[in-house]
Image: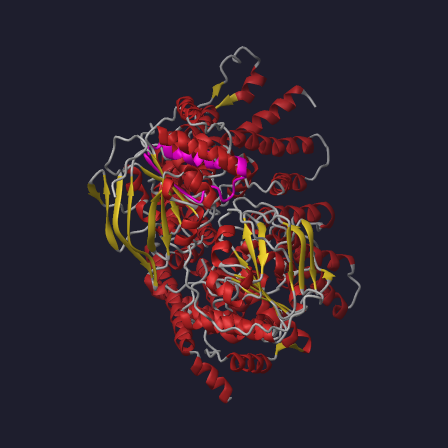
Amino acid sequence: MSKVIEKVLHFPSLRQKSLNTATRYFLMILFAFLIFGLILFVSGKDPIQSYKDMFRATFGSAYGFSEVIVAMTPMLITAIAVAIPARIGLINVGVEGQLYIGALFATWGALTFPNLPAWILLPGMVFLGMIGGGLWAFIPGFLKSIGLVNETITSLLLNSVAPSINSFFIFGFWHSARDTNITPNFVSAARLPTFFGTRVDLSFIFALGLLMLFWLFMKYTRWGLEMRAIGGNPQAARRNGIPLQLYIVIIMVIGGGMAGLAGMSQASGYYGLLLANFSNGLGFMGFLICWLAGGNPLGILLIAFVVAVITTGGNLLQLTQGLPYAVINILLAFTLFIVLARPTLFSNRKKS
Amino acid sequence: MSLLAILGVISSAIFSGTSLLYTTLGEVIGERSGIVNLGLEGILLVSASFGFAVTKTTGSPYLGILASVLAGGLMNMVFGYLVVTRRANQLASGLAVMFFGYGLSALIGKSFVGAKINPLPRYVLPGLSGLPLVYTSLFKFDFLIFLVVPVAVLIWWLLYRTRWGLGLRAVGENADTAFASGRNPQRIRYQALLLGGMLAGLGAAHLAIAYTMDWSEYMTAGRGFIAVALVIFSKWDPLRAIAGSLLFSAAVAFQLLLQSSGVQVSPFLLNTIPYLLTILVLIAWGGNRKQAAPASLGRVYAGSE
Amino acid sequence: MAFVSASENIAKPFVSMRGITKSFQAVLANDRLDLDLYPSEIHALLGENGAGKSTLMKILYGFYRCDAGVIRINGQEVGIHSPHDARNNKIGMVFQDFSLIPALSVAENIALFLPHLPAVLNIREINQHILEVSKRYDLEVNPRAMVSQLSVGEQQKVEILKLLLAEARLLILDEPTRVLAPHEAEALFKVLVSLRQDGYTIVLITHKMKEVLECADRITVLRGGHLAGTLLRSEASEDKLVSLMFEKKLVPLHVNREGKFSESGIPLLELKGAGTRLEGLVPGLKNINLKVHAGEIVGVAGVSGNGQKELGDLALGMIKCFRGRKFLFGKDSTSLSIQQMRRRGVGFIPENPLTMAIAPFMTVLQNMALTRTWSYARAGGMRMEWKSVKDDAEKTMQALEFSFPLYVPARSLSGGNLQRMVIVREMTHEPRLIIASYLTRGLDVQSTIAARQALVQARDKGAGVLFISEDLEELFTLSDRLVILYGGSMVGSFKPDETNVFEVGHLMTGSEVQHVQSN
């Protein structure tokens, strides 16, 4: 314990830094809500009443709160999928695509092996999901490591390819009798179990576990250390003997694997089937959350939570106040604009 | 496969490719100055919805086109403020603009879904009026279509034959050198984004007002991202962009034709072709070690020290 | 001292600099320098690295602002605050690493800097203009070619044309022949002579003796930021110039020369016929034959830019030689990765720790572990044993008598402490071979002494050191053997007491010397 204190004292800026970060997050959230209120007002709705409704719906009931968790979970995982490569300076905008391919692989597992028991099928699907996403991320990762193409461009392009591949399989081979856009329902063995009659499923545990593992990994392990060294100064890391190229490929694949897991959990948990174009920008949202949080696991948790509250509350307001869903997008965008425009309140951003 | 069918493909390609070409041209200009705009999709949607709304309310498609162009320029200026003046990350800013566009366009267009507007007059290609109706109806184009290739050539001329274009390309390659030559990279980037945004607005106008004559949420269906890919595919060259847009739209039209003829090629797989081709092309150049992309694309210009 | 120029009629200087003083933080780069430049002359600015030549010219070009001093053009005092001002005053400069845009054509690169460019470009006219000027001065290039396709020599021609067409009358060339082949350098001098004929003033920043004596009309020698002297070419000789360029005194740093090295043992490091590729503007190494034995410090002298950095990187494994072979402890190690080299006991201390050796935002202690993460990892890599890292580091710190905080972010350390940190890290695991590349560059006196002592200590314990430096004094006092690099080749190899500063100075500047005793 004394060692910890010694370390903290030796690190005079540590306390100051965490205070700054907390203030920053708090202010961001405050801004978001202020602007939302403004938009509501301008649209002719009563902001106070809207907020009351929103809070009652999301925090007032256990089920409401659980809906927030449901919305938050996939974004947590996609944010991790961006955060891991970001530690070594890679920009993984390809999460959208990796998401789809992960879902694809997992769906194949669900539809091909409907008779397996859950305790074999589900882990298998998780595995398949991760392989799918990892594979999709391998392409940009490999190309980057041999210095051919920038990973941002390739992963963006692949984003647009993946949903088409999914649709191809759904339409061509897997579609259900009633609708060509979706597969038949997964058997219950292929579905992630939910909790307490809510829609929160096992993927929430995955997400929390992954966040924790990510944090522990980066802080304590040898590879976390080497990754941070690469992120801090890639050329110096190379001179110090750290195998840069190997890391680029492996870490991109791991990031993709996470995205694939998110895809699998959407298909298996949330929907219970594979729906064409099921992602409404989940991958991009994950990118933005990670970017806003500076890649910090706690920040990711916090910001994903806030975004989930906004979207869930917005969904509700759509029903109660006749507010178009579009407003949510505008709110999110405005929040981002403010953070991006970096007014002096939010200074001290390392990432750019 | 009859001649009519083939001509139908070409006609369809021209119709749907025009908006794509305008948009791609706009992005070429922006990227040539070093800025990549992932929010193009959102900008297209806002311009389209605004243009459509104005067309419906004023009854004049010309005013609608003007409105769309202005909206596109304005949206890109917002984007420009973030990435040029505030030096924000271009990817994140682009995505923010995308979300903004999704939301704003839905709001603007809400009361206009399914509305009918006055169409733009269409003219037969000069010299063809003697042919039977069944052919000429395929090749009756509105003025925006007639203008698109000349505009592309104009943009080419602007980039390669004017002092402004030279400065713009220099900024996109090496903003420090451009600065050393007495130019102001930030101002040039704003100019590029304004022009690019207006062209994107023009593309959106053609899509909503001249082609589909309709508004629905997310109607641009990824055209913004396709344009970004096409810019890469055309090696940032406005003339090649003509070919690229035409090829892409033709592929889509062709695939529809195949389907109706009973040939089973999955439309989804065909959809992936432009992107896969672009990746292959990138790999091919990458080995050349001489990047075709503007050298400072995506990088933040720190300004003079 | 009245100077009569080649045209014999003009006696007033075109540009006159008086009392130019400039410091960068603690370093005084220019100390009250005076310089006159006349029309129709080729003026060489000679000096070692750090002498201040580039700085002086960058001030003239408006790239830096001087702390004190006056610049006059044609007798009028002017303020030059930016390269734009300089160009308006008809002054142009070609930098060492060029400022051309590879993706644009020759004509476009030149057009960017043309003072009266019309809004609509008349390509044909521009091309014609370029052809005219290039023909006149023998700088022929294809105006339509893309710069990326040009050779280095051709790119230089474009840079000069750029200045000429921008109507400069004073051309400053910074180390122009650094990456040119001998025949290309010859061609360049012919061009300079014909330019001088037409009244241009040319300033040639260089460290190469031959060039200076071949084509300069007047020579100004700088040393350590001071003006060492200005001579006419007729008054100058190699010996005289070398004596002006290099300090005569040698501060005695007592070094125990009874090193334990035996030449008969297997060398720790051996390079046989090693050559590296020419990468853009970086000269490649040519046919390097070098041995470093245990208990020996091999010093590598040379003016920076002659391949020293490449040599250090080659020895480490950062770049691979495409010709020849590299042997570590007797075994072929040409294709080993850096990690493999380090595992076998190779340490590397580069010149700029902040950019080349450490992760700035991680703590000092964390940085300590970066070169040998595998040896401190426990439980299969799941955790790091920081106590061992700390103990090892502290042990070395004690042995070297260094002291710096461990738990602060690395970038908060001063330059001197950063280098100490890197030295501690590299020395901690008793490396058998140490590559030190400019390790005392930019360091304060105390840190410099400490760093040198650390190297000597390591040598005394039996390590071998490849010591790359630009400080001749340091090289002479510390090295057991000295080699000189010039233009990517080794041009000499002696024991320090077999030679002297002047001889080495000659070799460093490319002039030939009879005494070469190869090892």
Magenta segment includes C177 = yes
* C251 or B184: nearer the viewer: C251
Which span of residues is magenta-colored?
C155-183
Drawn side of residue C1 relative to residue B145, left or right:
left
- Answer with the quarter of the image where residue B89 lies: bottom left
Magenta segment includes A327 = no
Q: Quadrant of the N terminus of chain C?
A: top left
Q: Quadrant of the C terminus of chain C?
A: bottom right
Q: In percent of the image, x 48 and y 49: which residue is there?
A: C509
Asked if residue B162 shows in the view, the reply is yes
**Rendering coords of residue B16 (x, y %):** 54, 32
Drawn side of residue C453 relative to residue C74, left or right:
right
**Rendering coords of residue B171 (x, y %):** 41, 41
**Rendering coords of residue A49 (x, y %):** 36, 65
* C46 or A144: nearer the viewer: C46
* B135 or C16: nearer the viewer: C16
